[in-house]
Each structure stands twice: as structure tokens, then as C-alpha cells.
Amino acid sequence: MRVVIQDASVLIDMADGGLLDAWFGLGFDLRTTSLVLREISRKNQKIKLQPYVVNGQLQIESSSGEVLAVIAKLHATLSSRLSIEDVPALHFAGKLNCVLLTGDKRLRQHAEERNTETHGLLWVCDMLVARGALLPGVAADRLERLLERGTSRLPLHECEQRIVKWRR
């Protein structure tokens, strides 16, 4: 089973876009970090994620004192500023040699520099459609919902291309 570490931006977009049930149904070993969960501040998003944590579908990589020291050192050495919440996702993705899901450009760049496979929410949507977890029209509706909210950092042109393709 493929391990996937998720940052806050992707989890927030999945919660806001109504994609969580489909995503957690694909059978990946899905994880995040305790700091990422704390970064999710809106109550409705936390409520949507909580059942997956409780039933073990979303595993939490917690940070011991030793791991926190490694994370603090990594944070200090990064050339571009990443939030302290993003650094554990980078650390665990490297440590576990797994996929990192992020919508953060700087986090993606640092992960790719470390040869960590990195994807974003559009990859998730592509997977959901390709594996039949969402019908193409439903995926287009969910993506439009995210764009209308105006809180996502998704690339507009790529979103529009997928929406047109999925509506055919």
C-alpha cells in the first residue's frame, strides 16, 4: 500500500471540496502530522477530518523530542521560508520515502530537490476520476466549488482544462 503524507492545504481543499470520502476510499496509507492537523483552524474542516483520524484511515505522525530537534534543524537550514507546520511533512515524506501531497509551492520545491515524489489536489482529482471514485461530472462540480470559494491556491488554467474535459 502506497504511503502518502498530506499537508494542510490539500486536506483543507479536500474537506471544502467534498472529496474526503472518495479519497479515503482509494486504499492509500494516508498520513499527516500532528502539526499539520493543528494548522487546520476552521471547525467545520476539523469536524470533517476527525472521523478519518478516529477510525485510523488518517494516521498521525507525531513528533517526539528527537524528531522535533531534527525538524527544527531542517527548518533553520531551508533557503526559503517554510512554515514550521510544513517542515514535518517534508521530513516524514523523506523519512518514509513516500508521496507528499501539497498545494504549497515552496514545500513542493524543497521536496522535489530531495527527490520526493510530490503532487497536489489536481492529481488527487485525476486519481479519483481514473479509479472511478468520482464520476467526471461530479469531479468538475467539486473543482468548481473550490474555485468559487476563492480560498484555494489551485492553478486556474489547469482547473478549467479539467472541468471542460470532465464535462464532455
Image (cartoon, helix red, strand yellow):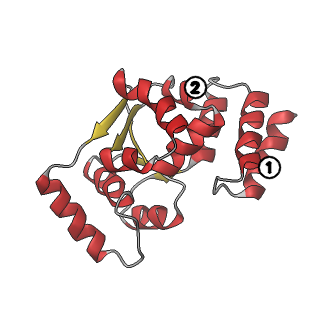
Looking at the rendered image, the quarter that the N terminus falls into is: top left
Sort mark 1 into few (<14), some (14-19) or many (20+) by Cα contacts within 10 Å: few
Residue positioned 73% across, 25% down in the render: 135
In the image, residue 120 lies at what x, y percent? Answer: 55, 50
Task: Kindly check if marks 2 and 1 are in contact, taking CB atoms under 8 A apart as contact.
Answer: no
Q: CA distance from mark 2 to mark 1?
A: 21 Å
In the image, residue 35 lies at what x, y percent? Answer: 33, 50
Which of the two labelled residues, at mark 2 and mark 1, occupies the earlier sequence position? 2
**In front: label 2 or label 1:** 2
Q: Which residue corresponds to mark 1?
A: 161
Residue positioned 62% across, 39% down in the render: 16
Q: Count up the numbered dots.
A: 2
* Residue 127 left/right relative to 76: right
Q: Which residue corresponds to mark 2?
A: 22
Sort mark 2 into few (<14), some (14-19) or many (20+) by Cα contacts within 10 Å: some
In the image, residue 89 lies at what x, y percent? Answer: 35, 53
Is there any visible trace of residue 56 in the rendered image?
no
Choose top left, top right, bottom left or bottom right for residue 163. top right
**Pick the front one: 18 or 47:** 47
In the image, residue 92 lies at what x, y percent? Answer: 29, 51
| Label 2 secondary element | helix
Residue positioned 85% across, 34% down in the render: 167
Residue type (three-letter) at the residue carrying disc 2: Ala
